[in-house]
Image (tube, rainbow, N blue to C red):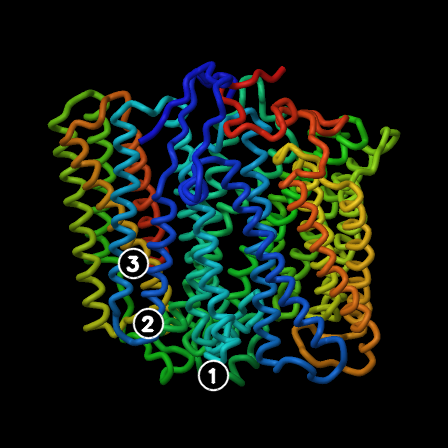
């Protein structure tokens, strides 16, 4: 049965379900958001462990610890887990927690569907990780074709577990589409009176646009894996030239999904940085509307640049040029954003708490990743860079020091609001500095070995790359283990024994509806809508 | 929206359905993969499908109960509408990608194999003598993928099916007009007509598939023509089946008197879906059968 929350009941006691049922049957955006975030955090350590296997193997040339076949499974699952299991769920978790609070709503528009979006993920990743466990027990192989699962590696040559992988991707897709529909319905329909579109916090805006990207491209990913399924099992020849198909068709379909996907993983990060920077610069965001338009332009352009991932597949020159120029265009709106963040800080009265440190780290290091992206967009240069460690360096700068850093920034920023306790600032700063130094030791040398020609996804390499690889491995282990500092800090803050209580506003410069309600935020934030002037 | 009536919010109580849904889907998936690998359908797959049926029955049942208990205000109604519209958009993208695969095969993959653009050597080295024509009645490698003897024409069954589906769009609109005017009898009969037309469509589609398999040698594994043909028409047929089931359910609900001239979101959602299926068919008829 269901309840209708009447008007003026917000002063009532905060009754919430108890026990395990609170989590298994939840219809509460905060509880669901919490589950998303813990799921993502767990997956971060699993995906990170796989990355450490890769880096351990690459510490020296020659084969040390794992067989090449197993190495391929590591790179594949590391990529899939980090993309679909860490970054995306973390952003959805943050959206769940923050979007209703930021627009003055009691919850998401469709709470039950919201919960299903979450519960599909453990199911999907259960199927994926089960194949890894089987592989470690010597029964078959986990997916081993890279996270991009190009045909024919995944069709003709894929292991049996590929079929589980296919359905696992289907389930993740259903989860993402439902999550996105929910966010759109929430933002369109649940805003408090006076909260016009152009008054929404930028984080809400970026998620609004991200949700459209998700709805548009997740079905395309579903078709890609469906065609894989039928090619593998039912005799179709979508990706087999012997029947008139084309393996390159797979790449087109995959990257039509895949390129908007990379913006799905970075637009909410832009939103977070746009919340954090003004707070700690104690100034309004510079160029609010240009931020909104820049985000929309990036989203639009993301649909017409996909083939820049495929410059070496033998496309006509005109096609290559089109995709090159379209890709370069994205630097313009992205530049607008970076300019606006810097201008927001200009002459602000800045302080450097942990969220701000991660935000500034984001701006610096994401820009590095952006510049290498620009280098990769140049067709003749890309012929040299394609499939080298330069590409690996590029996308780890935008995904780790970009997306992941923004998520860290958000966690430190909003943790006091979620728990009612301040986190340990000293520990937070230690986490930032250790991470930032080690992450650069880890990824920066990859630029050099990549430019020198070291291919990605290979367990062995030429002697000349040894020193940079050893540096990267040392950086990887320091970076990996330093994430335990964050875990410790989060646990400590939740338990709240030795921490300072957070005020409602938490941060001196914080503005927005989420800072007007108590810390920790009540189970139902707004049961009567606040009025936004 | 600033004009929204925020007098009260509706938030559902904790629900078991999301968890049931995950369990159902995971079971189905495990059943599907083990059935495919085992070469025959095992018991896990039907159990999973039954669980999915239970999920839909239970979850939608709960929503219908809440709706009948008048728990839903305008805001909830709007959320449902937004949800349904964007769900249909995601379906549009799903079909768009398959159409994209068809266009890619027809304009790029097959011509290039035949030597178009600068691919004379591709043709010479891979399958010399391969001619790029559409529909593809000779595959590059005819031993691996046995080509069909003939292609599916646009006249005959597909033309009948086009007429059926287009008329069904008219009948469901007539049903909607009847509903809005408060005329129960025409509502029910127009809905019955719509279901009948949908079922007839599915019947002829099955007939067409049987002809394709038995007489024309056109199968899923007869090269890219067969692959795109069956994938597009197959998924469309699946959607027609879903749509017909949905219309049957709103028919039952109409008979039970669930809908009022003002409030009948379920009816509208199903009608939108049905029109969407219709539009997809027009695209199919033009690009798969006709051109």
Chain bearing tag 3 is: B
Disc nearest the viewer among 3 and 2: 3
Chain bearing tag 1 is: B
On the image, numbered disc 1 is attached to which residue? B127
The alpha-carbon separation of the residues under discs 3 and 1 comes to: 44 Å
Q: Quadrant of the C terminus of chain B?
A: bottom left
Q: Residue at x 30, y 45 (%)?
A: B278
Q: Is residue B239 above or below residue A410?
A: below
- Contact, mark 3 vs mark 2 (Cβ under 8 Å): no
Mark 2 vs mark 1: same chain? yes
Where's residue B46, x and y in %?
Answer: 25, 61
In this image, A17 relative to B255: left or right? right
Where's residue A367, x and y in %?
Answer: 78, 50
Which type of secondary structure does the marked residue at label 2 adopt?
Answer: helix
Q: Residue at x 80, y 77 (%)?
A: A465
**Residue closer to the observer: B248 or B142:** B248
How packed mark 2 is, by other alpha carbons closer than 10 Å (few <14, some 14-19, many 20 or more), is some
Q: Is residue A370 above or below residue A198?
A: below
Disc nearest the viewer among 3 and 1: 3
The alpha-carbon separation of the residues under discs 2 and 1 comes to: 32 Å
- Mark carried by residue B83: none
Q: Earlier in the sequence, mark 3 or mark 1?
A: 3
Q: Earlier in the sequence, mark 3 or mark 2?
A: 2
The alpha-carbon separation of the residues under discs 3 and 2 comes to: 15 Å
In this image, A382 relative to A50: left or right? right
On the image, numbered disc 2 is attached to which residue? B36
Disc nearest the viewer among 2 and 1: 2
**Residue closer to the observer: A372 or B20:** B20
On the image, numbered disc 3 is attached to which residue? B48
- Contact, mark 3 vs mark 1 (Cβ under 8 Å): no
Where's residue A312, x and y in %?
Answer: 65, 70
**Residue closer to the observer: A252 or B133:** A252
């Amino acid at each position: 049965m269901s309840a209708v929350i009447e008007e003026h009941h917000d002063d009532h006691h905060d009754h919430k379900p108890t026990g395990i049922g609170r989590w298994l049957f939840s219809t509460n955006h905060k509880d669901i958001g919490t589950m998303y975030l813990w799921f993502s955090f767990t997956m971060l350590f699993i995906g990170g462990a796989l990355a450490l296997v890769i880096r351990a193997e690459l510490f020296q040339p020659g084969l040390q610890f794992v067989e090449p076949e197993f190495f391929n499974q590591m790179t594949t699952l590391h990529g899939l887990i980090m993309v679909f299991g860490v970054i995306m769920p973390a952003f959805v978790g943050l959206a769940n927690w923050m979007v209703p609070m930021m627009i003055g709503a009691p919850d998401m528009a469709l709470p039950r569907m919201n919960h299903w979006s979450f519960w599909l993920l453990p199911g999907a990743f259960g199927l994926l990780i089960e194949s890894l466990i089987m592989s470690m027990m010597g029964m078959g192989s986990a997916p081993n074709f890279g996270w991009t699962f190009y045909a024919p590696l995944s069709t003709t040559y894929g292991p049996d577990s590929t079929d589980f992988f296919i359905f696992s991707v289907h389930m993740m897709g259903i989860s993402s589409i439902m999550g996105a529909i929910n966010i759109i319905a929430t933002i369109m329909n649940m805003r408090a009176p006076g909260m016009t579109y152009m008054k929404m916090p930028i984080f809400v805006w970026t998620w609004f646009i991200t949700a459209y990207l998700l709805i548009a491209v997740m079905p395309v990913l579903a078709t890609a894996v469906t065609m894989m399924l039928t090619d593998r099992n039912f005799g179709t020849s979508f990706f087999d030239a012997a029947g008139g198909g084309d393996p390159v068709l797979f790449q087109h379909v995959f990257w039509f999904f895949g390129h908007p996907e990379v913006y799905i993983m970075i637009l909410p990060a832009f939103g977070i940085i746009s919340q954090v920077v003004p707070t700690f610069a104690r100034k309004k965001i510079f160029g609010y509307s240009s931020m909104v338009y820049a985000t929309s332009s990036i989203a639009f352009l993301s649909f017409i640049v996909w083939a820049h991932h495929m410059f070496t597949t033998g496309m006509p020159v005109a096609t290559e040029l089109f995709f090159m120029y379209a890709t370069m265009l994205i630097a313009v709106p992205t530049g607008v954003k970076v300019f606006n963040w810097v201008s927001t800080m200009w002459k602000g009265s800045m302080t450097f708490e942990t969220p701000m440190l991660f935000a500034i780290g984001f701006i610096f290091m994401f820009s590095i990743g952006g510049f290498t992206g620009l280098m990769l967009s140049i067709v003749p240069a890309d012929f040299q860079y394609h499939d080298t460690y330069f590409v690996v360096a590029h996308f780890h700068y935008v995904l780790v020091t970009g997306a992941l850093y923004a998520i860290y920034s958000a966690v430190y920023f909003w943790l006091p609001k979620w728990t009612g306790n301040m986190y340990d600032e000293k520990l937070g700063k230690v986490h930032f500095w250790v991470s930032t130094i080690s992450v650069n030791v880890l990824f920066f040398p990859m630029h050099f070995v990549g430019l020198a020609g070291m291919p990605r996804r290979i367990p062995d390499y030429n002697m000349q790359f040894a020193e940079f690889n050893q540096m990267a491995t040392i950086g990887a282990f320091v970076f990996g283990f330093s994430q335990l500092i964050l875990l410790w800090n989060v646990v400590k803050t939740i338990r709240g024994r030795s921490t300072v209580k957070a005020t409602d506003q938490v941060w001196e410069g914080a503005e927005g509806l989420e800072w007007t309600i108590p810390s920790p935020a009540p189970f139902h934030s707004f049961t009567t809508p606040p009025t936004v002037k | 929206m600033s004009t929204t009536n925020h007098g009260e919010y509706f938030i559902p109580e904790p629900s078991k359905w999301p968890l049931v849904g995950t369990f159902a889907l995971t079971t189905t998936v495990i059943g599907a993969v083990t059935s495919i690998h085992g070469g025959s359908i095992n018991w896990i797959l039907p159990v999973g499908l039954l669980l999915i049926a239970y999920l839909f029955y239970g979850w939608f049942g709960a929503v219908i109960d809440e709706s009948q208990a008048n728990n839903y205000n305008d805001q909830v109604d709007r959320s449902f509408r937004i949800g349904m519209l964007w769900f249909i958009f995601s379906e549009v993208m799903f079909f768009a990608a398959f159409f994209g695969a068809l266009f890619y095969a027809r304009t790029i993959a097959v011509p290039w194999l035949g030597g178009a653009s600068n691919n004379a050597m591709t043709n010479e080295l891979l399958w010399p003598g391969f001619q790029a024509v559409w529909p593809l009645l000779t595959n590059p490698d005819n031993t691996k993928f046995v080509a069909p003897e003939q292609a599916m024409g646009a006249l005959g069954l597909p033309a009948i099916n086009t007429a059926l589906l287009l008329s069904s769009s008219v009948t469901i609109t007539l049903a909607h007009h009847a509903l809005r005017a408060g005329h129960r009898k025409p509502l029910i009969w127009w809905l019955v007509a719509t279901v009948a037309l949908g079922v007839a469509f599915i019947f002829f589609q099955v007939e067409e598939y049987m002809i394709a398999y038995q007489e024309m040698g056109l199968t899923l594994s007869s090269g890219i023509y067969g692959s795109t043909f069956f994938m597009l028409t197959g998924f469309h047929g699946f959607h027609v089946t879903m749509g017909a089931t949905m219309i049957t359910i709103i028919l039952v609900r109409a008979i039970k008197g669930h809908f009022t001239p003002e409030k009948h979101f379920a009816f509208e959602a199903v009608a939108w879906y049905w029109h969407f299926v219709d539009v997809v068919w027009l695209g199919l008829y033009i690009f798969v059968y006709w051109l």
